Image: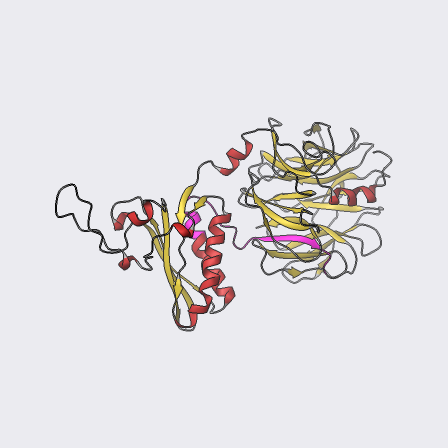
Amino acid sequence: MNKTNPIIYVVVLGAAAGLLHAQQSDITIKLTQGERAAIAVPDMRGAGASAPLGRFVNETLFSDLQESGLFRMVPKSMYPVEVPQRPQDFVAPQPAPRAGAPPIRKGPWLTDWSGPPANANYLTIGYAAEQGGRLVLFGWLYNVNQTDLANAQVFGKLYFGDLDEGGARKVAHDFAADILGQFGFKSLAGTKVYFVSDRTGAKEIWEMNHDGNSQRQLTRYGSTSTFPAVSPDGTKLLFTTYASGYPMIYLHSLETGRRLPFYNQRASMNATAEYTPDGQTVLFSSTAAGPFAQLYACKPDGTELRRLTHSNAIDVEPTVNPRTGSDIVFVSGRSGLPQIYRMNIDGADVVRLSSGEGEAVNPSWHPDGQHIAFSWTKGYDPGNYNVFVMDVTTREYVQLTHGAGRNENPCWAPDGRHIVFSSNRSGSTQIYTMLADGTQVKPLTTQRNNEKPVWSR
């Protein structure tokens, strides 16, 4: 380990992956909140110029709610024949003419959805229309377990967007966000995933929406650009690039796309940069002090260098606790194979978190500051990497991926309920999302090879 070339080691860390047998733990139960409410999301129709956009509204709304992990989606095959579009479409049953007889049904009602076969708890209804050259979506959420219509309506709202596919997806995202907000959760709409792709012939930094839409190239150096990191305010991008012949840290504005000044120490490698939660400090790995990459802190422009680690091994991939801002997890070879360590931001109190078995790399803090996701070669199919989640206090861990190729570089979503990661399970390396319990795995990319995703607000 100590004889490994530091430049090669950084590249190896970025490519690591694996398959393991899961250890039982309540970690994912804590993160995914247990039993889910059932929600029915029937398709909404549109009139006039809005009609062709209905499919984008419907697929986006259904997808946002399904992928939130908060709900059990009622299969559409279980829906009643009559689907209301407006509150006025509901018709309360009439009392039975004689005692013991069921009420007389006069039209769509709440019990159509709360009873079998749907057995829903919640129902979305609505419709789209054109208004003044814009798309307007009328959306309502109902708690169908209530007995009267007034109490059943959770909310009703109008949403506006452009009269095109983008506008249709926007109004659906907004409707879904308001539904999630009723349960105390934030939507991922508007968040971005930054990643590395070789689809143009060289590895460059790209961005996309949280659902994989609107993929866009950000760098054009024609070299290897990797390890993206986004400032907390979402305005700046740090990354490692070989554009100058050896690994250096570049800084770009995400608002203008232009390169900004960042001072690189004289070294054979400056890499794996990361911001502190307040955006006032950058942590990175460098060989400025000798052959072994060590951890350093500096100002956002690379100045005022401070050394944090002093080991005779390679230390890389620092990331700061988002809740405390005072402790770091990182990867080090000081005990042999790469393992995950934790220390104070001043470099004191270094402790190893992973067991020492296999290789543990790519740590990512959960927003709660209590859990990390990481890649590990321990467990099922040893030698490959899989995604794990660990409680950093108890050291309890659970394996999320199993027997599906190399799974690497996990990163938490801002909602703390989703993880984005890369995997070669399809033959090429692509980016996927999943819930924190390892379910609902969904590919976000398909072209060439894509890796090292970072999920940003």
Q: Reply yes or no: does residue 179 show up in magenta.
A: yes
Q: Which colour style is shown?
A: secondary structure
Q: Residue 114 vs residue 449: left or right?
A: left
Quadrant of the snapshot with the N terminus: top right
Q: Residue at x 42, y 69 (%)?
A: 50
Q: Residue at x 44, y 53 (%)?
A: 176
Q: Residue 296 vs residue 210: left or right?
A: right
Residue 97 in the image: above or below residue 349: below
Q: Which residues are magenta?
A: 177-199
Q: Position of residue 393 (x, y in %)?
A: 60, 28
User: Could you say which quadrant of the image residue 292 lies in?
Assistant: top right
Q: Nearer the viewer, residue 318 or 22?
A: 22
Q: Position of residue 130 (x, y in %)?
A: 40, 70
Residue 146 in the image: above or below residue 172: above
Q: Reply yes or no: does residue 165 show up in magenta.
A: no
Q: Is residue 229 visible?
A: no
Residue 171 in the image: above or below residue 230: below
Q: Nearer the viewer, residue 377 or 344?
A: 377
Q: Position of residue 416 (x, y in %)?
A: 54, 42
Q: Is residue 84 visible?
A: yes
